Amino acid sequence: GPARPSGAGHRRRVGAPVPSTPRASAVSHSVGDGVPPPSILHVDMDAFFASVEVLDDPSLAGLPVIVGGAGARGVVASCTYEARAFGVHSAMPSVRARQLCPEAIFLPGRHGRYAEISADLHGILADITPVVEPIGLDEAFLNVAGAIRMLGHPEKIARGLRDRVRTDLSLDCAVGIGRSKMIAKLASRAAKPRASRAGLIPGPGVVLVEPEVELAFLHGHKVEALWGVGPATAKRLHELGVRTVGDLAAVPGETLMRRLGKASGLHLSALAHGEDLSPVTPNRAAKSIGHEETFSQDVLDPAQLERHVLRMAESVATMLRGSSTAARTVTVKVKFSDLSLQTRSSTLAQAITTGGAIGHVAASLLAGIDPGEGIRLLGVSASGLVAGGGDQLSFDLGDGRDEGTQSATSLEQSWQDATAAVDAIRDKFGRSAVGAASMVTDDGVQVPARRDAPWGPAQ
C-alpha cells in the first residue's frame, strides 16, 4: 500500500497554538470535575484521491502524483505529499502546479473508485456512532457522546478509528477532537503531516483540544481558517489590521457588522470567541444534483452547446432516479470566456425525473443565453428535490423556438416507459450499454457520472 504519512498513530493534547501560526493572547475556560470531555470528532483522509491512486498502483509510491485536470483549464483535486513539497495544493490551477513540479504525474481521477472506498470508510464510522455528518467523500464529523460509555474516552475512540482505517482500507486519516465542529476541524488539520523538501514531517494523527485551552488554540490561527472568510472578507479584515482569529476577537461586534454586514459580522464575531453551536447532522439530504464541465476550448456553436446540455441533462436524470428523487427546478449554469457567470432556472409545478423532460427545460433555458465570445463552462443541475418518482406535470414550458416542440409535461409522460427500459438495461449490462444520442462518442456510449470531469479537461 501507499506510504503512511501520519506517523505511528500517537496523539497530541493542545494547550497552545499550532507552531505554524502566530500566538495570540487567550482567555482560558476553567473546567470543573464531571464536565464531559469534548465529543465532536472530525475525520479527514490524508490526500484521499491521490492516496487511493497509489494504493491501486504501488509503482506510484514516493512520486509526486496529482489528481485533477491536466489541461490548461484544469485544477488540482488532490496530490501526494511528494507533490506538496513543491508547493502544490488542492484547487491550484494545473498550469501552476506543473510549473512548480515539472515531474508531477497527472491522473484524471476515478470518482467511482473514490466513492467505493468512501462507502467503506462510512461503514467504519457507522460502527462507532449513527451520528455521522458526511462532508464530501473524504471527511466527516461524528458526535461520539453516546458512544463514550461503551467505547471509552473520545481520544481512545479516535485512535481506534484511525487504526481501523489503516488496517481495513490501507489508508491514513487525521482526527481532530473538540467541543464544536469548528474546533474539531482545525484540530484535524493540526493532526496532519506536513510536506517539506527535506522530507515528510509526520503529524500526531490525533489532536484533542481541551476546553480550557480552546481559545488559545483558536486565536493562534490565521483569520482565513474560519468558516465564511473567503478572499474578499479576508481583504476587508486585513484592512482593519486583523490577521489572526485573536485579532478578530478583539474587534467590537458593532465594527464588524458595519464593515461586513450584520449577518456576517455576528457570525464571525461568534466564531472568533469559540461560539459554534452547529450540531452534527446525520443523513443530510442533498439539496441539488448536477453535472458541469469545463471545455478545453470555448464553445460558440448553438447546436454543439445544445448537444452538451442534453447529455448533461440525461446524466442528471440518471442520478436523480438512482437516488430515488425527482426535481421541480432545473438550472443551467454558464461561464463565459471572460469568466463571468450566468444562471437560468425554471421551477415546474410538479417534479420530473426523465432525461427528456429535464433536457427540454435545460435546452430552453440555454437558448435564452447569448454565448457572446464563447462559453467556457456549462452545467445542468436539478433542485427542489422530493422523494420518489416524478408525477405527470401540469406546467407547460414553451420555449418559443419551435411551435411543434413538445411540452415538458408530455415529454415526462412519454419518456416514462422508455426511461424504465433504459434503467433496466443498464442495471443488467452496465451504464454504457445504452444511452441517448447525445452520449454517443467514437468510443461508444458514455454516460457522464456526477463528477466525471469536475476538475477541468485533460487537454
Image (cartoon, grey):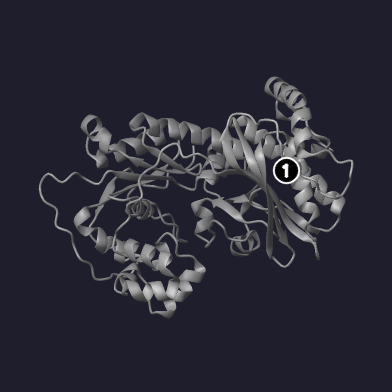
Residue 417 visible at all? yes
Mark 1 residue type: Met
Q: Circle 1 sits in a helix, a strand or a loop, which is it?
A: helix
Q: Is residue 15 left or right of residue 287?
A: left
Q: Count of labels shown?
A: 1
Residue 73 in percent (x, y) is at 69, 59
Quadrant for residue 248, please give it.
Answer: bottom left
Residue 191 in percent (x, y) is at 35, 51
Residue 180 in percent (x, y) is at 31, 51
Dot 1 alpha-carbon crowd within 10 angstroms: few under 14, some 14 to 19, many 20 or more: many
**Which residue is drawn at the image coordinates 40% and 53% (left, top)?**
193
**Which residue is drawn at the image coordinates 78% and 48% (left, top)?**
364
**Which residue is drawn at the image coordinates 22% and 52% (left, top)?**
210
**Furthest residue toward left:** 33
Q: Is residue 282 above or below residue 275?
A: above
**Which residue is drawn at the image coordinates 76% and 38% (left, top)?**
408
Q: Which residue is mark 1?
A: 312
Towards the viewer: 143 or 416: 416
Residue 55 in percent (x, y) is at 53, 38
Residue 448 visible at all? no
Towards the viewer: 389 or 104: 389
Quadrant for residue 447, please give it.
Answer: top right
